[in-house]
Image (tube, coloured by chain):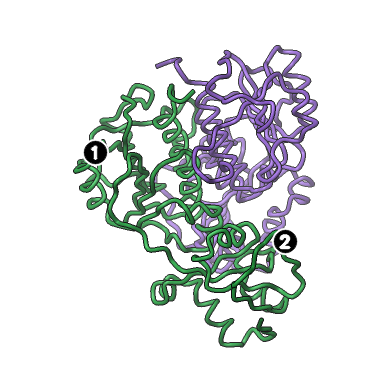
Chain colours: A green, B purple
């Protein structure tokens, strides 16, 4: 076990660099923070490069640290490393997962240019909860390994396939597998409760302000919308994805 | 029209104080930021005390500023006043709305101790979209007039009644009106798709970590849960509220 006391230590600098997308792409590694995420990473140790713990932290007794490389840091180093205001003092450097890019499942969530990291993370968590086979992050989406995305996803990325790829390519692959593409749009779209419920589908949601790119909507098999009954102009994209995923995956089935 | 160039101007200090709950309660006023929110406030001018605009900002031509008190500020003052990283340079001081505390509608969302401002705001926006009659913020919830709550609510608080009151009191009132209280819980609860759909209901959702207070669950008429099909432990509370509000308010009806 190592002990690091200075924020200027090269290892600390290297860990902090992992908060940038550039460094994550260069090294294939990323940093996670907090008891919940580190515990989930420990359940599949192949994810973990090393665990980093602030000196005042007592690790939960049930954590199995066998064979895990561990470094202890001072509280000041932990604060420097933390991305949140209230630092929990537990971190891990993880390896990015090699994700299969061939889409062979029956239900997917395709995300077009959603920029808010919290929305991306919440949709990954929701897709996992709904039992979807995977999430595709198209161009313009927040990076999966952004700390805010990981925090909102609450560890779902450890077991749910999340693939970054151009959506035109994903749609092409899914169509070859006869998976209907279900767009979300306000025009040329039907109330979601009137759309056919099929065993397989790929739901396509879009940017917070502008929705799904019209070029992608040309490729969909049908489009749905969620009616607005009050005076708000729209729903948050993660809420809309939740309503639609549960509706299309679970309405009137498995009850 | 006034022009303010210094961040040390007493008016600027007073506006900044409105970012604290204490000052908002003292004055009955709050600060909003951004084109969307200010435009919504302008549509009901009784909300507005004054509008504050950064010198470089061109106001949209369709905004009707008749009779609105306006102050121009420098870009540096705007940055000092802004709560977000990318300041839009448009603000308004608004009056808190006097909300009727008697609950005479048929559908409500009751929120118990949800702490994240983004979750509170997103639920207000969702409740508005779903055509619910009002939102009740119980003890322990983030303050409605917190800038992050207002940003996520996207102006829905201007027309949807949002009342802060103890939930025991709200439940009491609703029961007197024969509105069934529908709790969310993991134990002694049924799959939401098996629960009866009634014309009126009050949906009760709870804290991100611990759920609804067990004392409040003793007062509910029935409890529901949303099944988790994957490996995530739960849904985000705002996503869950969205799935349930649309299900109970709109499934199989109005289609």
- Tag 1 residue: A220
Under circle 2, the secondary element is loop
Percent x, y of residue A194: 34, 21
Q: Is residue A241 left or right of residue B199?
A: left
Quarter of the view holding residue A33? bottom right
Give above or below for A184 relative to A123: above
Of B67 and B55, nearer the camera is: B55
The quarter in which the N terminus of chain B is drawn is bottom right
Tell me: residue A17, above or below residue B133: below
Q: Which residue in the protein does label 2 denote?
A: A60
| Foreground label between 1 and 2 | 2
Mark earlier in primary sequence (1, 2): 2
- Where does the image place residue A81, in percent across and percent down from the top left? 61, 74
Q: Nearer the viewer, residue B58 or B89?
A: B89
At 48% from the left edge and 20% from the top edge, which residue is drawn? B250
Tell me the subunit letter for badge 2.
A
Q: Quadrant of residue B175?
A: top right
């Amino acid at each position: 076990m190592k002990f690091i006391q200075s924020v200027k230590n090269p290892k600390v600098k290297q860990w902090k660099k992992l908060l940038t997308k550039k460094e994550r792409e260069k090294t294939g590694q990323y940093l996670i923070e907090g008891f919940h995420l580190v515990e989930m990473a420990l359940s599949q140790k192949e994810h973990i490069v090393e665990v980093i713990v602030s000196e005042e932290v007592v690790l939960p007794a049930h954590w199995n640290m066998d064979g895990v490389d561990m470094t202890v840091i001072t509280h000041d180093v932990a604060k420097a490393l933390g991305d949140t205001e209230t630092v929990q003092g537990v971190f891990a450097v993880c390896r990015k997962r090699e994700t299969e890019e061939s889409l062979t499942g029956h239900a997917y969530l395709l995300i077009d240019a959603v920029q808010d990291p919290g929305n991306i993370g919440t949709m990954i968590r929701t897709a996992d909860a709904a039992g979807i086979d995977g999430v595709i992050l198209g161009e313009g989406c927040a990076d999966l390994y952004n700390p805010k995305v990981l925090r909102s996803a609450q560890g779902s990325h450890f077991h749910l396939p999340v693939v970054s790829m151009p959506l035109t390519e994903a749609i092409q692959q899914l169509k070859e597998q006869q998976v209907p593409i279900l767009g979300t749009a306000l025009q040329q779209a039907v109330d979601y409760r009137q759309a056919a419920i099929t065993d397989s589908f790929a739901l396509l949601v879009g940017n917070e302000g502008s929705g799904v790119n019209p070029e992608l909507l040309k490729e969909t098999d049908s489009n749905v919308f969620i009616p607005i009954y009050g005076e708000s102009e729209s729903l948050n994209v993660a809420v809309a994805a939740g309503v639609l995923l549960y509706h299309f995956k679970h309405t009137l089935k498995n009850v």
